[in-house]
Each structure stands twice: as C-alpha cells, then as structure tokens.
Amino acid sequence: MDVLEYYRLDEDPFKLSPNPRFLYLNDQVKQATAKVEYMTKHRTAPLYIYGAIGSGKTSILRRLYEHLSEDETYTLRLIIAPNIKTANSFLRAIMDAFSVPTDRAYERSLKKFEAFLIEQYTHGKVPTLFVDEAQNMTRDILKLMHYLLNYETSDVKLLQADIHS
C-alpha cells in the first residue's frame, strides 16, 4: 500500500513545485495577491515582490499568471532569469518570449521591441512580463528593465512587468 492509498489522497502531497492551487491564503497573502493583481490590471507601475525563500512569491506569480491568462487582453510571458548575465541576452530572451524578431544590433532590437509595444497598445493588448528569480539579474539587466519600462503613453506603461526575487 502506498501513501496515496493509505491516506486516501488524490495526489502526492509532497511536491517541491510551487503549485498556486496550494497557496495558503492567510490575510497577508490575500492582501499581497490583491495588490499584485490590482497593480497589474491597472498598469500603475512595475511590480517588485521580494521575500524569504518559501514565502509564496512564485506561487503568487503563477496564480496571477493563470488568472490573467483567461483574459485575452493580456499577452503574458514568463522568464526565469537565473543564468542570463548580459542585457543583450536578456533583451533577446524577452523578444523571443513575445515572438518579436531580434536584430544583430542591440539598439535596433530595442527599436523593434518598442514598435511591438506600440502595436500591442493600438490593438488594446497589454504585454505583461513576469520575471522569476530576479535576484540573479545583473546591474546592466536592471538598467535594461528600467529602460523598457520607460516606454509609455501619457496614461500607461506599454509594458507591464511583475518581477519576483
């Protein structure tokens, strides 16, 4: 008899993967989840979540990702950034995630991505980038993120970013 049979469980209770179905919604997590969702939906600013290992950051990110994926307004992409060391590589990863062709020149790639963001805006789409494990981002990558988040209209940011570390 295995553990599932013995305890009459439907699935293995001891997995290390952050499954949002098992996110314990205490008051603090409910508040954090509501803030993350509000800021993402209303495009108020980039969102940065940090905390101790095991505090639920990735589970909150995945829960929001699943929730927003049901809405066709959002073009969602997730990047896990532990091994990307240069801004150019990170820009290429972002552009690949959004299926935007890159250019050999860094500046031309930036222009192409800006054109993509403007096109998305004119079609009523919200490109949303989720970055997990962001504590591994270099200073140059953080500068790139700052630059990309400066693409905006008078009202909204053209790229919504939720960054977790």
Image (cartoon, grey):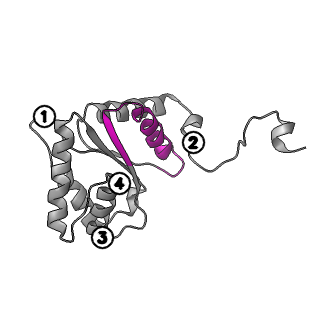
Location of residue 61 in the rendering, given as x and y in whole percent from the top left corner: 44, 42
Q: Is 161 situated above or below 103?
A: above
**Extreme-right residue of the structure:** 1
Location of residue 116 in the rendering, given as x and y in whole percent from the top left corner: 20, 49
Spatial CA distance of label 4 from label 3 is 17 Å
The residue sitting at 87% across, 38% down in the picture is 6
> Which part of the image, by quadrant, shows the N terminus?
top right
The residue sitting at 34% across, 61% down in the picture is 93
Q: Label 2 is placed on what type of residue?
A: Asn
For the residues bearing labels 4 and 2, Cβ distance under 8 angstroms: no
Mark number displayed over residue 97 = 4
For the residues bearing labels 3 and 1, Cβ distance under 8 angstroms: no
Q: Residues within 10 Å of mark 4 (few under 14, many from 20)?
A: some
Is 105 within the magenta? no
Q: Label 1 is placed on what type of residue?
A: Asp
Is 69 within the magenta? yes
The residue sitting at 27% across, 61% down in the picture is 91
Mark found first going from the N terminus, 2 or 3: 2
Q: Is 147 situated above or below 55?
A: below
